[in-house]
Image (cartoon, grey):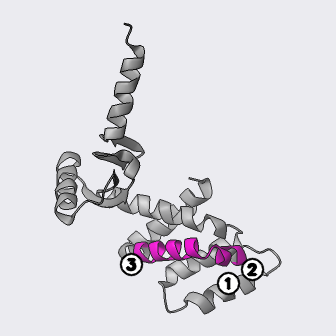
Amino acid sequence: MTKTARVYGGALYDLAQEEQRSDRILEELRALRAAFAQEPAFIRLLATPSISKEERCDILDQSFRGKIDGYLLNFMKILCRKGSIRAFGDCALEFQRRYHEDHGILEVRAVTAVAMDEALRARLQDRLAEVTGKRIELSCRVDPGCLGGVRLEMDGKQIDGTVAQRLETLRRQLAQTVL
């Protein structure tokens, strides 16, 4: 995470909390981040030095006025004026990190060989909430290379209970065995 993202994303979060708009702004940040990932040319346009800062802010106004929270629109204009609009995605992640921290939310990604049904997903989410004492925001991904089991990725850590990992551990143990 860049210093720009920590400073600007954190400042937006502080303002949103103070004004009781953090829920709405978080959802809008997520939607914008996803949209910009789909259309990276829009961010490149907003970062183009040959377009004046005023014109770039006008583009933001034309695109988003009345469609997103005014604080968020002004935030994006500030990033444009400072030449930091390319940091928007990281700013959004910092906002989300601070929001999750304040609201006791833990993001967890579960990676499995086949898709989990809703009942299993709910059981996993409930168990993780019980163990961590936090509200769990669970996302799931399928990776056939797991072969079976589940790998959990959370808070920069990984708990790997997949068949592939167990086989790799067994392979290493066998390689060290002297006959």
Q: Are marks 3 and 2 in contact (CB under 8 Å)?
A: no
Answer above or below: position of 30 versus 112.
Answer: below
Instruction: Determine the CA span between mark 1 and mark 2.
Output: 6 Å
- x then y, percent, for residue 59: 67, 87
Q: Secondary structure at mark 3?
A: helix
N-terminal-most mark, 3 or 2: 3
- x then y, percent, for residue 39: 60, 76
Instruction: Determine the CA span between mark 3 and mark 1.
Output: 22 Å
Answer above or below: position of 121 versus 131.
Answer: below
- x then y, percent, for residue 79: 64, 71
- Judged left or right of residue 31, residue 78 is right
Q: Secondary structure at mark 1?
A: helix
Which residue is labeled 2 in the image? Answer: 53
Q: Residues within 10 Å of mark 1 (few under 14, many from 20)?
A: many
Amino acid on which disc 3 is placed: Arg
User: Which image quadrant for residue 170?
Assistant: top left
Region in magenta: 26-45
- x then y, percent, for residue 117: 22, 63
Amino acid on which disc 2 is placed: Lys
User: Which image quadrant for residue 55?
Assistant: bottom right
Which numbered tag is attached to residue 57? 1
N-terminal-most mark, 3 or 1: 3
Which residue is labeled 3 in the image? Answer: 24
Q: Quarter holding the C terminus?
A: top left
Q: Residue at x 47, y 83 (%)?
A: 69
Q: Residue at x 36, y 28 (%)?
A: 169
Q: Are marks 1 and 2 in contact (CB under 8 Å)?
A: yes
- Judged left or right of residue 124, residue 32 is right
